[in-house]
Amino acid sequence: MSKGWFISFEGPDGSGKSTQISLLAEKMKLAGFPVYQTREPGGTLIGEKIRSLILDPANHEMAAVTEALLYAAARAQHAEEVIKPLLSAGRIVLSDRYMDSSLAYQGVGRRLGDAVRQVNEIAVGGLQPNRTFLLALDPAVGLNRIDRAHDRLEAEAIDYHRMVYQGFLDLAQQHPDRIRVIRADQPSDQIHAEIIADLIDLDPGFEKLAEAIR
Ligand code: TYD
């Protein structure tokens, strides 16, 4: 495959995104694909600094709009410094969260609406993933899997997380060509297999993934 691929993973906290992204990255490396694993907020030095600012539980006075702009700023840096150059070089970029997280958490959860999409369009200049895997899991189940008070966002009330989750499901309905919903309440191996099957569907060039042993 000559062109780069941009694949994002989305879902509620505790949905197992990070496990799946690592499994896929490992499998891609074994199969000889030029894969690069990254995450948001973060992925760059500047982005990681913004990440600590946003997630610090001490920053409980942060206004919703400040939060949205900080996520978008971290994403702008990530897109310019990391994602776009890698895609131009023909690499496969796997990102743990991207723009859909802002649309769901800030747009829907914080009720900032379409302004979040607009500011993110400016941030990334229209760069969208070729494929997004939404790991679907009841937020109450996800939050039970993790330490709830871990960061400022995770510590929000369950109603907030339910709104965010509905936001993700609505996005999947609006973008059926890009977003694949995968049930996250299944064994990890099964989820991994579904992701690989979908990628092979997307491009037969990914066939080698089915042969690589983990
Ligand atoms: P992350 O560390 O990826 O948490 P998790 O391991 O649960 O995925 O993300 C930190 C938090 O930031 C998470 O609660 C989701 C939230 N978030 C937003 O609210 N908006 C965004 O644009 C992004 C990228 C993350």
Image (spheres, helix red, strand yellow):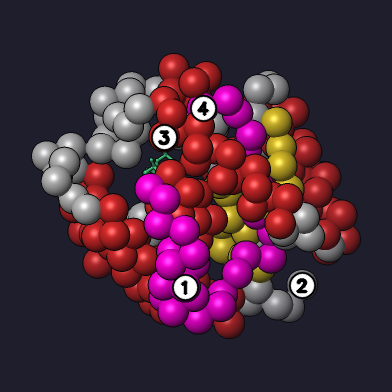
Residue for badge 2: 1
Q: Are marks 2 and 3 in contact (CB under 8 Å)?
A: no
Q: Nearer the viewer, mark 1 or mark 2?
A: 1
The crowding category of the residue bearing disc 1, from other C-alpha atoms within 10 Å (few below 14, some 14 to 19, many at least 20), is few
Magenta stretch: give its range: 110-139
Q: Are marks 4 and 3 in contact (CB under 8 Å)?
A: no
Which residue position is annotated with label 4?
A: 139
The span from disc 1 to disc 2 (Cα, nearest Å) is: 32 Å
User: Which amino acid type is shown beneath numbered disc 4?
Assistant: Pro
- The residue where tag 3 is placed is 160
Q: Residue at x 35, y 27 (%)?
A: 157
In the image, is residue 152 above or below residue 175? above
> Whole-percent x and y of residue 165?
55, 37
Earlier in the chain: of badge 2 and badge 3, it is 2
**Is residue 101 visible to the viewer in this orientation of the structure?**
no
**Residue 29: horizontal and vertical position, in percent?**
62, 53
Image coords of residue 118 (percent x, y): 47, 73
